[in-house]
Amino acid sequence: MEGENWAEKLGYPVNSKVVMLHADDIGMCSEANEAVIPYLLNDQIQSAAAMVPCPWFNDIADWYKKHPEEDIGLHLTLTSEWKNYRWGPVSNPSNVPELIDPEGYMWRGVIDVASRAPVTTVEKEVRAQIERAYERGIKPGHIDTHMGTLYSKVEYAEAFFKVAMEYGIPANVIEFTPDRVQKFRKQGYPITARLIQSGRKYTLPKLDDFTSVPNGKSYQEKKELFFDLVQNLEPGITEIIFHPSIETEGLKKITNSWQQRVWEAKMFSDPEVIQFLKNEGIIFTNWKEMMVRFKERTTK
């Protein structure tokens, strides 16, 4: 496939900004599911990823069975970060003991996992989450990684790439250009020469960039920061993640990031945001469309 970036490789116009607005953490709680479903049905966002080990995963799986055209992926989960709202692995705990903290849940922090769990254990749980999704009727449009855990060690990332290629499910893999390598190293990701080499062997479509909706001190500031982010995007395919949830007392008890999540449940149905994205000439895509375009260009 020819092209300067993945947008061009997949047949989008030269120099176009192609964006995927992507909701993380669905299935984590009811409030996340209630925020995301109308966004998807109204085509206000393009993609979302569900946390298989979490209490409200079955709810989103049941919804997906009625809406299989939507791009629901898996937010592969190896941590359980909140103070009182916790979950454990999908695997039998005796098969993945290194993923479990003294309280019987997954560890809270990425470093807790990376310092304890061998890649064989991580891969076992990743496969168990994918298989559970299939059992519940979800054919995942993509796979990505909660809290970036699968990029915390090169061995984990390589297992992530391998599993994606084996299942034929695209992962959130970025084209490791020098600029992107520098950007993600500054964020603390160990993008080593070995990982770059492994990325070159990855055979499914990639993103050109990956970023998140910025936090703001007010809803208006949050919108303005998002507008700045979009205006400064380079041409190519960029996934922009966020974590929408409707406001409830339950959400406030789960996470101290509840206000940002509530604003993100409002942002993408906001007429001002919708008009801004139109004015910017943004082209939208999702992982399912990317895979269709990819197969058209690679299948002889």
Image (tube, grey):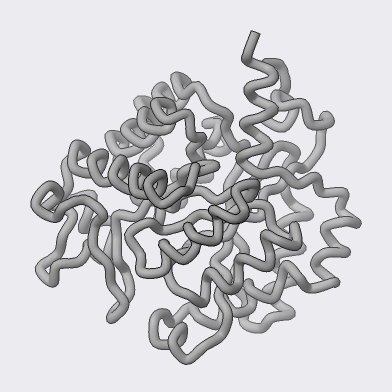
Relative to the observer, which residue lies in front, 281 or 128? 128
Relative to the observer, which residue lies in front, 281 or 162? 162
x then y, percent, for residue 156: 30, 39
* Rendering quarter of residue 54: bottom left
x then y, percent, for residue 80: 29, 66
* Rendering quarter of residue 107: bottom left
Task: Give the residue displayed 41% in from the left and 68% down from the top.
Answer: 56
Measured along the vertical axis of the image, is residue 57 above or below residue 165?
below
Q: Is residue 5 visible?
A: no
Left or right placement of residue 96 versus residue 276 in this view: left
x then y, percent, for residue 2: 71, 16
Residue extending farthest to the top is 300
Left or right placement of residue 213 versus residue 75 in this view: right
Screen quadrant of the C terminus: top right
Task: Give the residue displayed 58% in from the left and 63% down from the top.
Answer: 242
Task: Give the residue displayed 40% in from the left and 49% down from the top.
Answer: 133
Measured along the vertical axis of the image, is residue 33 above or below residue 207?
below
Q: Is residue 245 visible?
A: yes
Task: Give the residue displayed 76% in from the left and 70% down from the top.
Answer: 269
Screen quadrant of the N terminus: top right
Left or right placement of residue 90 versus residue 6 in this view: left
